């Protein structure tokens, strides 16, 4: 299959998962099976690998790449938000490791007709799962200017969010905004030229914001991470790779929350909450080395966080 994606932090991820040869591992963001293939290579015939992805192209590519794996492999086309249901359907009661490699994959960005890239003209789509009803076209053409402002500011950290949303609202009164080129042209008009000359093209932040909204990337994350921890057996590992500050903040906060013990107010003489930590956080976030960043520029912003089930 034509699905070439270079997985970031490959060796560090395998080290973080601390593979048990006969164990059960879940890759919640399968992609082209770069990480999954490395996990499978560490597993015995008694081992089990569950791969989840909502992109049918990724599933097809992973089937080819994992065809010769010695362990038992199950590939599921679904959203990782349904992790408990997926594991129940696969008759998995507990796992030794769960991996999330968040964000958009290289093939999705590099395939023009998917509409993820602001540098290629294509229909406004941006769906990771092309069965989904919500598209970038729907977001751009039907959301109110106020809601677009919230998305651009919250998910894209774009300080010109309100002005860009107003320009979109004005443009779509004349005709629908149908392509990525149409949207980029509107952003160009909305953001002053002297601003566009600094810090990269603002369309990059707008496209990120719309993509996150279309795929609900941030709203489902805390719940999915919590479900993953609950699915782990004691000593099992959770490894999460993030690519921008918004998702990394959620991962860090969720791990800290799950690692906390008593949450009673400080003045309470005796613990009455009964809250106990579910995980211990292992070390600090790891970043890709200089050599990997040189070979794969998309690794520059990657962070790997690891936790172990108590």
Image (spheres, rainbow, N blue to C red):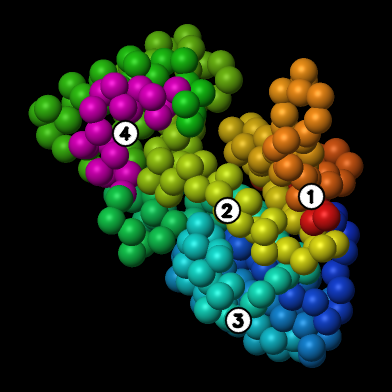
Q: Residue at x 77, y 66 (%)?
A: 233
The answer to which of marks 4 and 2 sits earlier in the sequence is 4
Q: Which mark is residue 279?
A: 1
Closer to the camera: disc 2 or disc 1? 1
Q: Quadrant of residue 30?
A: bottom right
What is the spatial separation of the Cα atoms under label 4 and label 3, in whole angstroms?
45 Å
Labels 4 & 2 near each other (Cβ < 8 A): no
What is the spatial separation of the Cα atoms under label 1 and label 3, in whole angstroms?
24 Å
What is the spatial separation of the Cα atoms under label 4 and label 2, in whole angstroms?
32 Å
Q: Which mark is residue 224?
A: 2
- Judge by depth and name the residue closer to the eye, 232 or 112: 232
Quadrant in the picture for the C terminus: bottom right
- Judge by depth and name the residue closer to the eye, 72 or 114: 72
x and y, in percent, of residue 168 in the image: 25, 26
The answer to which of marks 2 and 3 sits earlier in the sequence is 3
Residue 68 is left or right of residue 120, and the answer is right
Residue neighbourhood size for the residue with mark 3, other residues' Cα within 10 Å, grouped as few (<14), some (14–19), many (≥20): few
The answer to which of marks 4 and 3 sits earlier in the sequence is 3
The answer to which of marks 4 and 1 sits earlier in the sequence is 4
Q: Which residues are magenta?
A: 135-153
The answer to which of marks 2 and 1 sits earlier in the sequence is 2
Labels 2 & 1 near each other (Cβ < 8 A): no
Callout 2 secondary element: helix
Q: Residue at x 55, y 64 (%)?
A: 83
x and y, in percent, of residue 267 in the image: 77, 18
Q: Which mark is residue 91?
A: 3
Labels 4 & 1 near each other (Cβ < 8 A): no
Seen in the picture, residue 58 relative to 159 is either above or below; the reply is below
Q: Which residue was labeled with disc 4? A: 183
């Amino acid at each position: 299959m034509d699905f070439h994606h270079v997985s970031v932090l490959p060796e560090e991820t395998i080290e973080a998962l601390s593979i048990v040869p006969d164990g059960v591992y879940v890759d919640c963001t399968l992609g082209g099976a770069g990480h999954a293939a490395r996990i499978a290579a560490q597993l015995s015939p008694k081992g089990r690998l569950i791969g989840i992805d909502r992109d049918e192209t990724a599933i097809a590519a992973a089937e080819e790449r994992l065809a010769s794996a010695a362990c038992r492999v199950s590939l599921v086309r679904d959203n990782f938000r349904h992790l408990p249901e997926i594991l129940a359907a696969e008759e998995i009661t507990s796992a030794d490791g769960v991996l999330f490699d968040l964000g958009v994959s290289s093939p999705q960005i590099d395939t023009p007709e998917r509409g993820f890239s602001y540098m290629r003209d294509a229909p406004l789509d941006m769906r990771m799962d092309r069965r989904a009803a919500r598209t970038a076209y729907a977001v751009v053409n039907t959301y109110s200017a106020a809601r677009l402002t919230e998305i651009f500011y919250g998910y894209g950290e774009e300080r010109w969010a309100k002005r860009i949303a107003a320009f979109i609202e004005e443009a779509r009164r004349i005709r629908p905004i149908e392509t990525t080129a149409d949207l980029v042209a509107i952003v160009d008009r909305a953001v002053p030229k002297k601003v566009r000359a600094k810090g990269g093209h603002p369309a990059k932040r707008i496209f990120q914001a719309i993509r996150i909204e279309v795929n609900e990337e941030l709203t489902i994350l805390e719940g999915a991470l919590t479900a993953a921890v609950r699915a782990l057996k004691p000593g099992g590992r959770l490894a999460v790779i993030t690519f921008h500050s918004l998702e990394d903040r959620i991962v860090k906060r969720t791990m800290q929350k799950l690692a906390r013990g008593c949450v009673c107010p400080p003045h309470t003489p005796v613990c009455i909450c009964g809250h106990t930590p579910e995980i211990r956080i292992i070390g600090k976030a790891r970043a890709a080395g200089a050599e990997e960043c040189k070979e794969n520029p998309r690794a520059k912003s990657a962070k790997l966080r690891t936790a172990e089930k108590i």
